[in-house]
């Protein structure tokens, strides 16, 4: 499809585009019809001159007809060189015809030749200008014939020949407009073929781009999920090798963890291949984050504090974490505070979850930190912040830019958010993803950050507090 799509615009561009006819010019069969009409009228005038006049007036009439024919034939070439020549030519043709009309009382047939400049004017001038010219020709005809034929007869002849001029001028005008319409249709057809070719090319490129984006999305999903699990498996396997020499009794637990990680990796690969799981809804995002943070602590030993802003979200988070044994509490929540709008959409929630996963991957692999903090604002405008106290890095260095930052920025851009990274060697790293308007909202909100704080507890802490905290929850100051 790409080949054909790319070839169509080139072929359409090579098609000769029809050009509109020159002003006063006809094309093809219309030109021949005009030429035959002029030839018929001129031949009739010559024959009538030969039959109607004696030797003296006949020669004068023939000379006038030759002069008229010379004016008619020379008009196109001279008009191209000097545009006003057409008007001068019309005046000279009318003068020749007027002189012929005064020869005798039987010379009225010369008035038919005025139909030729009438046709030319209809093709070149506006309709009103051509109509005015035909009216002037009628006056000229009547004025030249009145001396020989009388007023009544002159008026009748003027009306008859004016009617012939109108008929032939209307025919010429209709023919010209039909020719122009045909050429416009041909031009539109060429434009349509060209547009169809470009559309086919764009469709092929869009299909190719969609494939590239899908591959990039799958690569990011693999990097954010299965790749991190395989990394954890590698670390656990290396730990098992070390324990095999020092403490063989602990190797069994490590191998069990490797087995569980392997099963997790298989589940993640199956989910990716089947386009599952579906993105979490906005209200499910805190629970999905908390579940991921518990898995991260269990596999990597990374303790992450999750802070979700808003009293409404606190109840959701607590309900989502209670079954998992998490610790949740509300700090400084305002009971009268209301949500300013709906939370993140499913697409936004999925992107934010992936950004958190990748950011924590970097904390485990590169930051050298044992703890981190994730802050999430679910009310519009929403905001996500991941902060660690690790070794940091230089964002300007080329070697430090390949830490999954491009993938996080792409995910933020796909949902219309921005992503900023603040870091320096020895000062930790802060990643902020926010939708437009979030920065001003956070500035207006400070001081006094209302949030639900979800902290990770070790299994030993959970066992020690299992009988005294009524469901595994407490409020952290």
Image: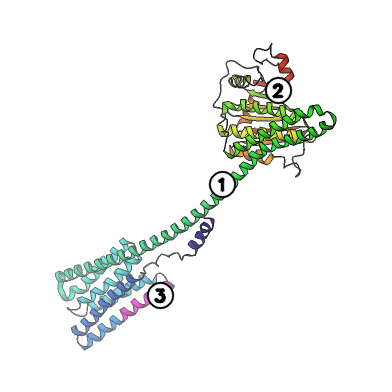
Task: Name the secondary structure under disc 1.
Answer: helix
User: Which dot marks residue 136?
Assistant: none
Q: Which residues are magenta?
A: 67-80
Q: Are marks 3 and 1 in contact (CB under 8 Å)?
A: no
> Which residue sits furthest top?
468
Q: Is residue 104 left or right of residue 289?
A: left
Magenta residues, dominant SS class? helix
Disc 3 packing (10 Å; few <14; some 14–19; many ≥20): some
Mark 1, residue position = 210
Query: Going by the image, does 310 lie left or right of 59?
Result: right
Q: Which quadrant holds residue 168?
A: bottom left
* Element at label 3: helix
Ranked by sequence position, the earlier of labels 3 and 2 is 3
Circle 2 SS class: loop
Marks 2 and 1 sit apart, C-alpha to C-alpha, by 40 Å
Q: Which residue is mark 2?
A: 456
Q: Residue at x 38, y 74 (%)?
A: 76
Q: Which residue is mark 3?
A: 78
The span from disc 3 to disc 1 (Cα, nearest Å) is 61 Å
In the picture as drawn, the residue positioned furthest to the right comes out as: 246
Q: CA distance from mark 3 to mark 2?
A: 96 Å
Q: Position of residue 67 (x, y in %)?
A: 32, 81
Residue 236 image position (x, y, % from top left): 76, 33
* 181 to the left or right of 471: left
């Amino acid at each position: 499809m790409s080949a054909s799509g790319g070839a169509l615009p080139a072929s359409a561009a090579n098609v000769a585009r029809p050009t509109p006819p020159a002003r006063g010019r006809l094309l093809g069969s219309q030109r021949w019809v005009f030429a035959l009409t002029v030839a018929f009228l001129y031949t009739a005038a010559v024959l009538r001159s030969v039959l109607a006049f004696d030797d003296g007036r006949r020669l004068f009439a023939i000379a006038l007809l030759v002069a008229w024919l010379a004016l008619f034939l020379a008009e196109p070439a001279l008009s191209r060189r000097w545009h006003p020549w057409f008007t001068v030519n019309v005046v000279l043709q009318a003068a020749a015809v007027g002189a012929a009309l005064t020869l005798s009382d039987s010379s009225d047939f010369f008035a038919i030749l005025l139909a030729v400049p009438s046709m030319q004017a209809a093709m070149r001038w506006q309709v009103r200008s051509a109509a005015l010219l035909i009216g002037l020709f009628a006056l000229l005809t009547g004025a030249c014939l009145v001396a020989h034929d009388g007023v009544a007869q002159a008026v009748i002849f003027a009306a008859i020949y004016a009617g012939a001029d109108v008929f032939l001028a209307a025919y010429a005008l209709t023919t010209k407009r039909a020719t122009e319409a045909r050429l416009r249709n041909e031009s539109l057809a060429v434009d349509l073929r060209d547009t169809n070719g470009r559309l086919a090319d764009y469709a092929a490129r869009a299909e190719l781009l969609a494939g590239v984006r899908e591959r990039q999305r799958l690569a990011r999903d693999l990097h954010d999920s299965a790749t991190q699990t395989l990394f954890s498996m590698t670390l656990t396997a290396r730990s098992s090798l070390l324990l095999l020499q020092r403490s063989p009794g602990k190797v069994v637990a490590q191998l069990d963890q490797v087995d569980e990680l392997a099963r997790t990796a298989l589940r993640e690969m199956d989910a990716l291949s089947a386009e599952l799981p579906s993105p979490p809804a906005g209200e499910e995002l805190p629970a999905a984050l908390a579940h991921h943070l518990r898995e991260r602590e269990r596999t990597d030993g990374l303790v992450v504090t999750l802070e979700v802003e808003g009293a409404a979200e606190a109840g959701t988070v607590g309900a989502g974490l209670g079954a998992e044994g998490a610790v949740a509490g509300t700090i400084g929540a305002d009971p009268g505070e209301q949500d300013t709008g709906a939370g993140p959409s499913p697409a936004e929630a999925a992107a934010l979850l992936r950004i958190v996963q990748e950011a924590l991957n970097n904390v485990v692999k590169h930051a050298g930190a044992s703890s981190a903090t994730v802050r999430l604002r679910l009310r519009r405008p929403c905001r996500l912040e991941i902060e660690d106290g690790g070794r940091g890095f230089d964002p300007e260095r080329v070697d430090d830019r390949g830490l999954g930052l491009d993938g996080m920025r792409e995910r933020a851009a796909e949902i219309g958010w921005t992503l900023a990274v603040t870091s320096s060697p020895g000062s930790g790293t802060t990643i902020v993803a926010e939708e437009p308007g979030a920065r001003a909202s956070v500035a207006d909100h400070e001081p006094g950050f209302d949030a639900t704080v979800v902290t990770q507890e070790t299994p030993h802490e959970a066992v020690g507090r299992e009988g005294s905290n009524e469901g595994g929850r407490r409020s952290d100051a």
